[in-house]
Image (cartoon, rainbow, N blue to C red):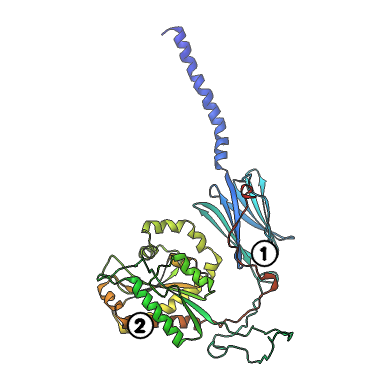
Amino acid sequence: MTIRQRHKTCFRPAGCVIPLLLTLLLFPLLCGAEDIAELRDFRYWDNREFLRFVFDLSKPVEFTSGKLSNPERLFFDLKNTKVAANVRKNVPVDRDLVKAVRLGQYNTDTTRIVFDLQAAYYNFKVLNLEDPPRLVIDIYSGGGKGGGREDLSAKVQPDALRPDEKSLSAEKQPDRDRPGSGRVTDFRNRVIKRTVVLDAGHGGHDPGAVGPTGLCEKNVVLDVALRARDIIRKEYPFYEVILTRDRDVFVPLPDRAKIANDKNADLFVSIHANASSNRSARGIETYLLNWTNDIEAMKVAARENAISLKQMKQQMKGELGMIFASLDRERNRDQAINVAGYIQQSLISSVGRKYPDVSDHGVKQALFYVLVGAKMPSSLVEISFISNPTEEKLLATEFYRQSIAKSIAEGIHKYFGSQPPQHIALDDQSTAGSGARAEPVSFTRAKEK
Protein backbone atom coordinates (compact mmCIF):
# COMPACT_ATOMS: atom_id res chain seq x y z
CA MET A 1 0.00 0.00 0.00
CA THR A 2 1.40 3.42 -0.97
CA ILE A 3 1.54 6.44 1.33
CA ARG A 4 -1.12 8.14 -0.78
CA GLN A 5 -3.41 5.12 -0.32
CA ARG A 6 -2.78 5.14 3.44
CA HIS A 7 -3.53 8.83 3.57
CA LYS A 8 -6.89 8.37 1.87
CA THR A 9 -7.74 5.49 4.12
CA CYS A 10 -6.99 7.48 7.26
CA PHE A 11 -9.31 10.32 6.26
CA ARG A 12 -12.31 8.24 5.24
CA PRO A 13 -13.56 7.81 8.84
CA ALA A 14 -13.58 11.57 9.34
CA GLY A 15 -15.81 11.94 6.31
CA CYS A 16 -18.24 9.47 7.88
CA VAL A 17 -18.03 10.89 11.40
CA ILE A 18 -19.09 14.45 10.54
CA PRO A 19 -22.49 13.49 8.97
CA LEU A 20 -23.01 11.08 11.86
CA LEU A 21 -22.41 13.83 14.42
CA LEU A 22 -24.78 16.16 12.59
CA THR A 23 -27.41 13.44 12.55
CA LEU A 24 -27.02 12.84 16.27
CA LEU A 25 -27.28 16.56 17.01
CA LEU A 26 -30.37 17.07 14.83
CA PHE A 27 -32.13 13.82 15.75
CA PRO A 28 -33.89 15.18 18.88
CA LEU A 29 -35.16 18.16 16.89
CA LEU A 30 -36.40 15.95 14.08
CA CYS A 31 -38.08 13.59 16.51
CA GLY A 32 -39.67 16.49 18.36
CA ALA A 33 -41.15 17.81 15.11
CA GLU A 34 -42.67 14.42 14.34
CA ASP A 35 -44.10 14.11 17.87
CA ILE A 36 -46.04 17.37 17.63
CA ALA A 37 -49.69 16.76 16.81
CA GLU A 38 -51.73 19.25 14.80
CA LEU A 39 -55.25 20.47 15.53
CA ARG A 40 -56.54 20.64 11.96
CA ASP A 41 -60.19 21.58 12.23
CA PHE A 42 -63.16 21.65 14.57
CA ARG A 43 -66.93 21.72 14.30
CA TYR A 44 -69.94 21.57 16.57
CA TRP A 45 -73.55 20.45 16.72
CA ASP A 46 -76.35 22.02 18.74
CA ASN A 47 -78.55 19.15 19.88
CA ARG A 48 -80.77 21.18 22.26
CA GLU A 49 -79.89 18.77 25.09
CA PHE A 50 -76.17 19.43 24.73
CA LEU A 51 -73.49 20.97 22.52
CA ARG A 52 -71.00 18.63 20.87
CA PHE A 53 -67.60 19.90 19.76
CA VAL A 54 -65.34 17.70 17.63
CA PHE A 55 -61.68 18.61 17.19
CA ASP A 56 -59.85 16.84 14.33
CA LEU A 57 -56.24 15.95 15.11
CA SER A 58 -53.32 14.53 13.17
CA LYS A 59 -52.71 11.97 15.93
CA PRO A 60 -54.12 11.09 19.37
CA VAL A 61 -53.06 13.48 22.13
CA GLU A 62 -52.92 13.65 25.90
CA PHE A 63 -54.81 16.46 27.58
CA THR A 64 -55.77 18.00 30.88
CA SER A 65 -58.81 20.13 31.70
CA GLY A 66 -59.78 22.80 34.20
CA LYS A 67 -62.40 25.38 35.12
CA LEU A 68 -62.04 29.12 35.65
CA SER A 69 -64.51 31.57 37.19
CA ASN A 70 -65.39 35.25 36.79
CA PRO A 71 -66.11 34.86 33.92
CA GLU A 72 -66.95 31.17 33.65
CA ARG A 73 -64.60 29.21 31.41
CA LEU A 74 -63.79 25.58 30.72
CA PHE A 75 -60.40 24.82 29.18
CA PHE A 76 -58.48 21.86 27.78
CA ASP A 77 -54.71 21.78 27.37
CA LEU A 78 -53.58 19.49 24.56
CA LYS A 79 -50.02 18.31 25.10
CA ASN A 80 -47.49 18.38 22.23
CA THR A 81 -50.03 19.99 19.94
CA LYS A 82 -50.12 23.00 17.68
CA VAL A 83 -53.04 24.63 15.90
CA ALA A 84 -52.95 24.57 12.10
CA ALA A 85 -52.58 28.00 10.56
CA ASN A 86 -55.89 27.81 8.67
CA VAL A 87 -58.02 27.11 11.77
CA ARG A 88 -59.91 30.09 13.20
CA LYS A 89 -58.79 30.92 16.70
CA ASN A 90 -61.93 32.68 18.00
CA VAL A 91 -65.39 31.41 17.05
CA PRO A 92 -68.68 32.81 18.43
CA VAL A 93 -71.16 30.08 19.36
CA ASP A 94 -73.90 32.13 21.08
CA ARG A 95 -75.87 29.24 22.56
CA ASP A 96 -77.49 28.86 25.96
CA LEU A 97 -74.41 27.21 27.45
CA VAL A 98 -71.47 28.36 25.35
CA LYS A 99 -70.73 31.91 24.27
CA ALA A 100 -67.59 31.27 22.23
CA VAL A 101 -64.67 28.91 21.62
CA ARG A 102 -61.07 30.15 21.58
CA LEU A 103 -57.94 28.31 20.49
CA GLY A 104 -54.42 29.41 21.33
CA GLN A 105 -50.83 28.30 21.83
CA TYR A 106 -50.50 28.24 25.63
CA ASN A 107 -46.78 27.53 25.32
CA THR A 108 -44.45 26.12 22.69
CA ASP A 109 -45.92 22.62 22.76
CA THR A 110 -49.36 23.03 24.36
CA THR A 111 -52.58 24.10 22.65
CA ARG A 112 -55.31 25.47 24.90
CA ILE A 113 -59.00 25.21 23.99
CA VAL A 114 -61.16 27.64 25.98
CA PHE A 115 -64.96 27.58 26.14
CA ASP A 116 -66.43 30.91 27.25
CA LEU A 117 -69.57 29.87 29.13
CA GLN A 118 -72.88 31.59 29.75
CA ALA A 119 -73.50 30.07 33.21
CA ALA A 120 -71.73 28.40 36.09
CA TYR A 121 -74.01 25.35 36.13
CA TYR A 122 -72.82 22.87 33.53
CA ASN A 123 -71.24 19.45 33.04
CA PHE A 124 -69.09 18.00 30.31
CA LYS A 125 -67.94 14.68 28.90
CA VAL A 126 -64.85 13.94 26.83
CA LEU A 127 -64.05 11.14 24.40
CA ASN A 128 -60.57 10.73 22.91
CA LEU A 129 -60.93 8.75 19.67
CA GLU A 130 -58.05 7.24 17.75
CA ASP A 131 -59.30 6.20 14.31
CA PRO A 132 -59.39 8.86 12.98
CA PRO A 133 -57.91 10.95 15.81
CA ARG A 134 -60.54 13.27 17.35
CA LEU A 135 -61.25 14.89 20.68
CA VAL A 136 -65.00 15.00 21.30
CA ILE A 137 -66.34 17.30 24.03
CA ASP A 138 -70.01 17.38 25.06
CA ILE A 139 -71.15 20.31 27.23
CA TYR A 140 -74.58 20.13 28.83
CA SER A 141 -76.60 21.75 31.55
CA GLY A 142 -75.82 20.72 35.10
CA GLY A 143 -79.02 22.12 36.57
CA GLY A 144 -79.22 24.81 39.27
CA LYS A 145 -80.03 28.46 38.85
CA GLY A 146 -78.16 28.90 35.63
CA GLY A 147 -78.57 25.55 33.95
CA GLY A 148 -81.14 23.84 31.79
CA ARG A 149 -84.68 24.54 30.74
CA GLU A 150 -87.33 24.59 33.40
CA ASP A 151 -89.52 21.48 33.35
CA LEU A 152 -93.09 22.69 33.55
CA SER A 153 -94.70 19.27 33.31
CA ALA A 154 -96.68 18.25 36.37
CA LYS A 155 -94.99 15.85 38.78
CA VAL A 156 -97.47 13.01 39.13
CA GLN A 157 -97.06 9.48 40.46
CA PRO A 158 -97.40 6.75 37.79
CA ASP A 159 -100.88 5.68 38.90
CA ALA A 160 -102.21 9.14 39.68
CA LEU A 161 -103.36 9.92 36.17
CA ARG A 162 -103.82 7.28 33.50
CA PRO A 163 -103.95 8.33 29.83
CA ASP A 164 -107.13 6.35 29.25
CA GLU A 165 -108.89 7.79 32.28
CA LYS A 166 -108.18 11.48 32.21
CA SER A 167 -106.87 13.76 29.47
CA LEU A 168 -107.49 17.20 31.01
CA SER A 169 -107.12 18.73 34.44
CA ALA A 170 -110.18 18.69 36.68
CA GLU A 171 -110.52 22.45 36.39
CA LYS A 172 -112.91 23.44 33.60
CA GLN A 173 -111.54 26.00 31.20
CA PRO A 174 -114.43 27.21 29.00
CA ASP A 175 -113.51 29.65 26.26
CA ARG A 176 -109.96 30.09 27.53
CA ASP A 177 -108.52 29.43 24.09
CA ARG A 178 -111.28 31.30 22.21
CA PRO A 179 -109.74 33.82 19.76
CA GLY A 180 -109.89 37.35 21.11
CA SER A 181 -110.64 36.26 24.65
CA GLY A 182 -107.23 37.44 25.84
CA ARG A 183 -106.68 34.18 27.68
CA VAL A 184 -104.51 31.19 26.84
CA THR A 185 -105.27 27.55 27.56
CA ASP A 186 -103.06 26.03 30.25
CA PHE A 187 -101.84 22.84 28.57
CA ARG A 188 -99.61 21.72 31.42
CA ASN A 189 -102.07 19.16 32.75
CA ARG A 190 -102.97 17.67 29.40
CA VAL A 191 -101.57 14.14 28.98
CA ILE A 192 -99.61 13.42 25.84
CA LYS A 193 -100.45 10.24 23.95
CA ARG A 194 -97.44 7.96 23.99
CA THR A 195 -96.13 6.81 20.62
CA VAL A 196 -94.40 3.55 19.77
CA VAL A 197 -92.82 2.76 16.41
CA LEU A 198 -92.73 -0.92 15.42
CA ASP A 199 -90.09 -1.85 12.89
CA ALA A 200 -90.47 -5.05 10.87
CA GLY A 201 -86.93 -6.00 9.89
CA HIS A 202 -85.68 -6.44 6.33
CA GLY A 203 -88.22 -6.37 3.46
CA GLY A 204 -88.30 -5.99 -0.32
CA HIS A 205 -85.12 -7.31 -1.93
CA ASP A 206 -83.75 -8.17 1.55
CA PRO A 207 -85.38 -11.42 2.73
CA GLY A 208 -83.45 -11.56 5.99
CA ALA A 209 -82.76 -15.05 7.29
CA VAL A 210 -84.34 -17.97 5.41
CA GLY A 211 -85.48 -21.15 7.19
CA PRO A 212 -84.76 -24.74 6.16
CA THR A 213 -87.99 -24.94 4.16
CA GLY A 214 -87.73 -21.45 2.66
CA LEU A 215 -89.70 -19.37 5.18
CA CYS A 216 -88.42 -15.77 4.94
CA GLU A 217 -87.75 -13.64 7.99
CA LYS A 218 -89.07 -10.49 6.25
CA ASN A 219 -92.56 -12.01 5.88
CA VAL A 220 -92.74 -13.43 9.40
CA VAL A 221 -91.73 -10.23 11.17
CA LEU A 222 -94.02 -8.07 9.02
CA ASP A 223 -96.97 -10.25 10.01
CA VAL A 224 -95.98 -10.04 13.69
CA ALA A 225 -95.63 -6.24 13.48
CA LEU A 226 -99.04 -5.87 11.84
CA ARG A 227 -100.63 -8.09 14.48
CA ALA A 228 -98.92 -6.20 17.31
CA ARG A 229 -100.15 -2.90 15.84
CA ASP A 230 -103.74 -4.17 15.73
CA ILE A 231 -103.54 -5.51 19.29
CA ILE A 232 -102.22 -2.20 20.62
CA ARG A 233 -104.88 -0.20 18.81
CA LYS A 234 -107.62 -2.45 20.18
CA GLU A 235 -106.43 -3.14 23.73
CA TYR A 236 -104.40 0.02 24.41
CA PRO A 237 -106.11 2.77 22.38
CA PHE A 238 -104.39 5.48 24.42
CA TYR A 239 -101.12 4.67 22.61
CA GLU A 240 -100.30 5.68 19.08
CA VAL A 241 -98.57 2.99 17.05
CA ILE A 242 -96.65 3.57 13.80
CA LEU A 243 -94.99 1.04 11.50
CA THR A 244 -91.79 1.64 9.56
CA ARG A 245 -93.27 -0.57 6.84
CA ASP A 246 -96.71 -2.12 6.44
CA ARG A 247 -95.98 -4.06 3.25
CA ASP A 248 -93.13 -5.91 1.56
CA VAL A 249 -90.81 -2.99 0.83
CA PHE A 250 -87.18 -2.32 1.66
CA VAL A 251 -86.45 0.50 4.13
CA PRO A 252 -82.75 1.43 4.65
CA LEU A 253 -81.56 0.95 8.23
CA PRO A 254 -80.93 4.67 9.00
CA ASP A 255 -84.40 5.60 7.72
CA ARG A 256 -86.14 3.34 10.21
CA ALA A 257 -84.92 5.21 13.29
CA LYS A 258 -85.47 8.48 11.42
CA ILE A 259 -89.17 7.65 11.12
CA ALA A 260 -89.34 7.31 14.91
CA ASN A 261 -87.35 10.52 15.42
CA ASP A 262 -89.53 12.49 13.00
CA LYS A 263 -92.63 11.34 14.87
CA ASN A 264 -91.06 12.21 18.26
CA ALA A 265 -91.82 8.65 19.33
CA ASP A 266 -91.41 7.50 22.92
CA LEU A 267 -90.26 4.00 22.00
CA PHE A 268 -88.73 2.17 19.03
CA VAL A 269 -88.99 -1.63 18.79
CA SER A 270 -87.42 -3.56 15.92
CA ILE A 271 -88.74 -7.10 15.31
CA HIS A 272 -86.54 -9.84 13.83
CA ALA A 273 -86.19 -13.61 13.60
CA ASN A 274 -82.88 -15.11 14.68
CA ALA A 275 -80.62 -17.48 12.72
CA SER A 276 -77.52 -19.53 13.40
CA SER A 277 -75.25 -21.96 11.58
CA ASN A 278 -76.04 -24.26 14.49
CA ARG A 279 -79.45 -25.63 13.50
CA SER A 280 -80.16 -26.74 17.06
CA ALA A 281 -79.99 -23.15 18.35
CA ARG A 282 -83.40 -22.04 19.55
CA GLY A 283 -85.12 -19.55 21.82
CA ILE A 284 -86.03 -15.89 22.29
CA GLU A 285 -83.76 -12.98 23.17
CA THR A 286 -84.16 -9.22 23.34
CA TYR A 287 -81.40 -6.70 22.70
CA LEU A 288 -80.53 -3.14 23.55
CA LEU A 289 -77.88 -1.07 21.81
CA ASN A 290 -74.53 -1.14 23.57
CA TRP A 291 -70.93 -2.24 23.23
CA THR A 292 -70.29 -5.94 23.72
CA ASN A 293 -67.47 -8.47 23.53
CA ASP A 294 -69.91 -11.39 23.43
CA ILE A 295 -69.03 -13.18 20.17
CA GLU A 296 -72.48 -14.73 19.75
CA ALA A 297 -74.19 -11.37 20.25
CA MET A 298 -71.78 -9.80 17.77
CA LYS A 299 -72.61 -12.53 15.24
CA VAL A 300 -76.32 -11.78 15.56
CA ALA A 301 -75.69 -8.05 15.11
CA ALA A 302 -73.34 -8.65 12.16
CA ARG A 303 -76.02 -10.68 10.41
CA GLU A 304 -78.73 -8.09 10.99
CA ASN A 305 -76.33 -5.35 9.89
CA ALA A 306 -75.42 -7.33 6.75
CA ILE A 307 -71.67 -7.16 7.45
CA SER A 308 -68.97 -9.62 8.45
CA LEU A 309 -68.00 -10.35 12.04
CA LYS A 310 -64.58 -8.81 11.31
CA GLN A 311 -66.21 -5.59 10.12
CA MET A 312 -68.41 -5.68 13.21
CA LYS A 313 -65.34 -5.70 15.46
CA GLN A 314 -63.70 -2.90 13.48
CA GLN A 315 -66.80 -0.71 13.79
CA MET A 316 -66.60 -0.94 17.58
CA LYS A 317 -63.27 0.92 17.50
CA GLY A 318 -64.28 3.75 15.20
CA GLU A 319 -67.01 6.35 14.78
CA LEU A 320 -69.59 4.34 16.69
CA GLY A 321 -67.60 4.73 19.90
CA MET A 322 -68.62 8.38 19.85
CA ILE A 323 -72.27 7.39 19.60
CA PHE A 324 -72.05 5.22 22.70
CA ALA A 325 -70.54 8.13 24.62
CA SER A 326 -73.30 10.52 23.58
CA LEU A 327 -75.58 11.89 26.27
CA ASP A 328 -78.72 10.82 24.47
CA ARG A 329 -77.55 7.23 24.41
CA GLU A 330 -76.45 7.32 28.05
CA ARG A 331 -79.76 8.80 29.21
CA ASN A 332 -81.77 6.26 27.21
CA ARG A 333 -79.72 3.23 28.21
CA ASP A 334 -81.43 2.60 31.54
CA GLN A 335 -84.82 2.95 29.90
CA ALA A 336 -83.73 0.64 27.07
CA ILE A 337 -82.79 -1.99 29.66
CA ASN A 338 -86.29 -1.68 31.14
CA VAL A 339 -87.94 -1.92 27.72
CA ALA A 340 -85.97 -5.02 26.78
CA GLY A 341 -86.67 -6.56 30.18
CA TYR A 342 -90.43 -6.04 29.99
CA ILE A 343 -90.67 -7.39 26.44
CA GLN A 344 -88.48 -10.42 27.15
CA GLN A 345 -90.35 -11.18 30.37
CA SER A 346 -93.70 -10.92 28.61
CA LEU A 347 -92.58 -13.19 25.77
CA ILE A 348 -91.24 -15.88 28.06
CA SER A 349 -94.12 -15.78 30.55
CA SER A 350 -96.69 -16.09 27.77
CA VAL A 351 -95.08 -17.89 24.83
CA GLY A 352 -92.79 -19.94 27.05
CA ARG A 353 -95.75 -21.19 29.04
CA LYS A 354 -97.49 -22.43 25.88
CA TYR A 355 -94.29 -23.73 24.29
CA PRO A 356 -91.99 -25.05 27.05
CA ASP A 357 -89.23 -25.95 24.59
CA VAL A 358 -88.67 -22.28 23.73
CA SER A 359 -85.50 -21.20 25.51
CA ASP A 360 -85.13 -17.92 27.39
CA HIS A 361 -81.85 -16.29 26.34
CA GLY A 362 -82.64 -13.15 28.32
CA VAL A 363 -81.68 -9.55 27.62
CA LYS A 364 -78.44 -8.94 25.74
CA GLN A 365 -76.62 -6.01 24.23
CA ALA A 366 -74.99 -5.56 20.84
CA LEU A 367 -74.39 -3.02 18.11
CA PHE A 368 -77.40 -2.92 15.78
CA TYR A 369 -77.31 -0.22 13.12
CA VAL A 370 -81.09 0.00 13.08
CA LEU A 371 -81.03 1.23 16.72
CA VAL A 372 -78.07 3.61 16.41
CA GLY A 373 -79.96 6.68 15.26
CA ALA A 374 -82.94 6.36 17.61
CA LYS A 375 -83.22 9.30 20.02
CA MET A 376 -85.61 7.45 22.28
CA PRO A 377 -85.36 4.16 24.23
CA SER A 378 -85.12 1.31 21.74
CA SER A 379 -84.97 -2.45 21.61
CA LEU A 380 -84.56 -5.25 19.09
CA VAL A 381 -86.46 -8.52 19.57
CA GLU A 382 -85.31 -11.84 18.09
CA ILE A 383 -88.61 -13.70 18.30
CA SER A 384 -87.29 -17.23 17.54
CA PHE A 385 -84.67 -19.03 15.46
CA ILE A 386 -85.99 -19.36 11.93
CA SER A 387 -82.94 -21.52 11.19
CA ASN A 388 -84.17 -24.13 13.67
CA PRO A 389 -86.54 -26.60 11.90
CA THR A 390 -88.88 -26.82 14.89
CA GLU A 391 -89.08 -23.08 15.49
CA GLU A 392 -89.45 -22.40 11.76
CA LYS A 393 -92.59 -24.57 11.88
CA LEU A 394 -93.87 -22.56 14.84
CA LEU A 395 -93.18 -19.24 13.07
CA ALA A 396 -95.15 -20.49 10.08
CA THR A 397 -98.31 -20.81 12.19
CA GLU A 398 -100.69 -17.91 12.78
CA PHE A 399 -101.30 -18.93 16.39
CA TYR A 400 -97.61 -18.70 17.30
CA ARG A 401 -97.18 -15.36 15.53
CA GLN A 402 -100.27 -14.03 17.29
CA SER A 403 -98.85 -15.12 20.66
CA ILE A 404 -95.57 -13.37 19.88
CA ALA A 405 -97.36 -10.18 18.80
CA LYS A 406 -99.57 -10.15 21.90
CA SER A 407 -96.57 -10.61 24.17
CA ILE A 408 -94.68 -7.74 22.51
CA ALA A 409 -97.74 -5.49 22.89
CA GLU A 410 -98.06 -6.44 26.56
CA GLY A 411 -94.37 -5.79 27.17
CA ILE A 412 -94.69 -2.33 25.63
CA HIS A 413 -97.74 -1.59 27.78
CA LYS A 414 -95.93 -2.72 30.94
CA TYR A 415 -93.02 -0.45 30.11
CA PHE A 416 -95.25 2.58 29.48
CA GLY A 417 -97.20 1.75 32.64
CA SER A 418 -93.98 1.94 34.65
CA GLN A 419 -93.38 5.52 33.49
CA PRO A 420 -95.04 8.69 34.84
CA PRO A 421 -97.59 10.05 32.37
CA GLN A 422 -96.23 12.75 30.09
CA HIS A 423 -97.80 16.20 30.11
CA ILE A 424 -97.55 19.07 27.71
CA ALA A 425 -94.82 21.45 28.85
CA LEU A 426 -94.61 25.10 27.88
CA ASP A 427 -91.43 26.07 26.06
CA ASP A 428 -89.40 29.02 27.22
CA GLN A 429 -89.43 31.73 24.58
CA SER A 430 -85.67 31.94 24.76
CA THR A 431 -85.32 28.34 23.57
CA ALA A 432 -88.00 28.39 20.91
CA GLY A 433 -86.63 27.68 17.51
CA SER A 434 -83.22 26.61 18.76
CA GLY A 435 -83.45 23.10 17.36
CA ALA A 436 -80.58 20.90 16.28
CA ARG A 437 -78.43 22.05 13.42
CA ALA A 438 -78.99 20.17 10.18
CA GLU A 439 -75.25 20.26 9.47
CA PRO A 440 -72.21 20.74 11.70
CA VAL A 441 -70.29 24.00 11.47
CA SER A 442 -66.63 23.70 10.47
CA PHE A 443 -64.01 26.34 11.24
CA THR A 444 -61.05 26.24 8.90
CA ARG A 445 -60.38 29.40 6.94
CA ALA A 446 -59.88 27.39 3.80
CA LYS A 447 -63.60 26.63 3.88
CA GLU A 448 -64.69 30.20 4.46
CA LYS A 449 -66.16 32.16 1.60
Residue 445 at what x, y percent from top left?
64, 48
Which mark lies nearer to you, 2 or 1?
A: 2
Q: Looking at the image, do the residues carrying marks 2 and 1 touch, with CB atoms under 8 Å apart?
A: no
Residue 29 location in percent, x, y?
A: 58, 35
What label sits on residue 402 in the rendered view?
2
x and y percent of residue 313 in the render? Answer: 41, 58
Residue at x 68%, y 71% (from the top left corner): 144
Q: Residue furthest front?
A: 179
- Res 260 seen here: yes
Q: Secondary structure at mark 2?
A: helix
Evaluate whether residue 361 shows in this view.
Answer: no
Tell me: residue 75, above or below residue 58.
below
Of 224 and 312, which appears nearest the observer? Answer: 224
Q: Residue at left 32%, top 76%?
A: 359
Residue type beneath disc 1? Leu
The residue that label 1 is drawn on is 97
Determine whether 73 is above or below 418 in the image. above
Secondary structure at numbered mark 1: loop
The answer to whether 77 appears left or right of 336 in the picture is: right
User: For mark 1, does the 10 Å Cα neighbourhood hold few (<14), some (14 to 19), or many (20 or more) residues?
Assistant: many
Q: Give the percent coordinates (x, y) of residue 182.
A: 74, 84
Instruction: Find the distance from the CA under tag 2 to the CA under tag 1.
Output: 50 Å
Q: Which comes sooner in the sequence, label 2 or label 1?
A: 1
Total count of labels: 2
CA neighbours of label 2 inside 10 A, class few (<14), some (14 to 19), many (20+):
many
Which of the numbered marks, if any, corresponds to residue 117?
Answer: none
Given residues 409 and 351, the one toward you in this image is 409
Would you say 111 lies left or right of 277 here? right
- Identify the amino acid type marked 2: Gln
Q: Relative to residue 105, is residue 405 depicted above or below?
A: below
On screen, residue 48 versus residue 396, left or right, reads right
Q: Residue at x 37, y 56 (%)?
A: 310
